[in-house]
Image (tube, helix red, strand yellow):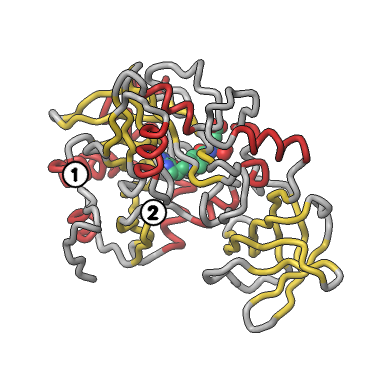
Amino acid sequence: MFNVFPTARLRPSPFFHSIMAEGCTAASIYNRMILPASFGNPEKEYWDLIERCVMWDVSAERQVQLQGPDAGALAQILSARDLSKQKIGQGKYVPICNHNGVLINDPICLKLSEDLYWFSIADSDIWFWARAIAAERGLNVEISEPDVSPLAVQGPSAENVVASIFGDWVRDLKYFWFKETEVNGIPVAVQRSGWSKQGGFEIYLRDGSRGDELWSIVKEAGQPYGIGNGGPTSPERTESGLVSCGSDSDDTTNPFEVRMGKFTDVDLDDSVVGVKALRKIKEDGPKRHQLGLVLDGDAKDPMAFHWEHILVDGQKVGDMTQCVWSPRMEANIGYALISVDCKPGDAVVLKRPGNREVGAKLVDLPFL
Ligand code: THG
């Protein structure tokens, strides 16, 4: 379909040969990796996720490893969420903010032991950030990228597929909890997680030389359940109200504005990066919030690349940051990052490409 030239800048996915053999037709770039998006039939890939199960190469969710006596201290300094009660084997969804309280990443923080953490990151370079903060604070911790690559299995049948590979214990895993194990001698960690609300797991491969083997094992186990290929699915994640940091947020967005207030603890010690700014933002009250948009009209009209302006009485009140066709709602739906003066139920106007004005209604998230 396409050639990829090996360079030191492009971390190869251990599942690359498998996804090419499966007929990957579309991809995006995420953490300077190829993130497979489609295998030629997005409609089917969506319904497989809703009704059956899908497997996704999400190795672009790269790991920032903190190792050493101060690993836990650094994890907390980087995270604007209280990690003091995090147990070994538990993952937590955490905002990483800069000193101004701007959200710069929203990883899952996995605690593997008292002195070993992984941040499973969204699309921004946290290694440099973590190293700089650790050095400035004089911490005894080593920051690296381990040989780890997540493979997601999502959808209502995902639990049956993953249990048939690893055993029924996976059914007892709580959300974001994980266990280190192996299959056919391939070392992995299995976590209940994934960027959909259809249920599922991520299998973190811990030996990049065995990606195609793991892919085949999951594919084989998924056959009785009609497992399909795919990639993180924008329509489903939008219906489900999941945040995509860097798409739904920009260089001025704080976690309170994108519904991450419940994961943000402003009472943490001042050593936590950004906490002083976040305290003030919370006190003053955030200026924007994230709501859903249901657009008028029934022709598919997804968003291209850029945020689009939202108007009330001809004045800009916010941005539409995301817009997709929802197969289950049979409507174009989107996210608004919009003035807190605008409320669910309000009618707004969208300035769409080609200078078209399209009406829309604000609603609470999630849609479904
Ligand atoms: N898996 C792994 N790493 C990741 C992602 C992932 N890193 C990047 C990115 N995705 C992180 N972003 C999110 C965003 C939302 C959720 C998970 C990862 C999520 N949120 C639920 C919600 O908001 O309803 C639950 C949050 C909670 O209750 O704690 O699932 O997908 N390995």
Residue type at numbered disc 1: Gly
Residue count near mark 2 (Cα–Cα under 10 Å), binned few <14, some 14–19, many ≥20: many
Identify the image quadrant of residue 107. top left
Which residue bears the numbered disc 1?
Answer: 211
The residue shown at (28%, 44%) is 223
Eyeballing the image, is 317 above or below 68? below
Residue type at numbered disc 2: Gly
The residue at the far right in this view is 313
Which residue bears the numbered disc 2?
Answer: 231
Helix, strand or loop under label 1:
helix
Identify the image quadrant of residue 201. top left
Is 79 on the left-hand or right-hand side of 319? left
The residue shown at (66%, 62%) is 320
Residue count near mark 1 (Cα–Cα under 10 Å), binned few <14, some 14–19, many ≥20: many
Closer-to-camera residue (201/255): 255
Q: Earlier in the sequence, mark 2 or mark 1?
A: 1
Closer-to-camera residue (291/247): 247
Distance between the Cα atoms at labels 2 and 1? 17 Å
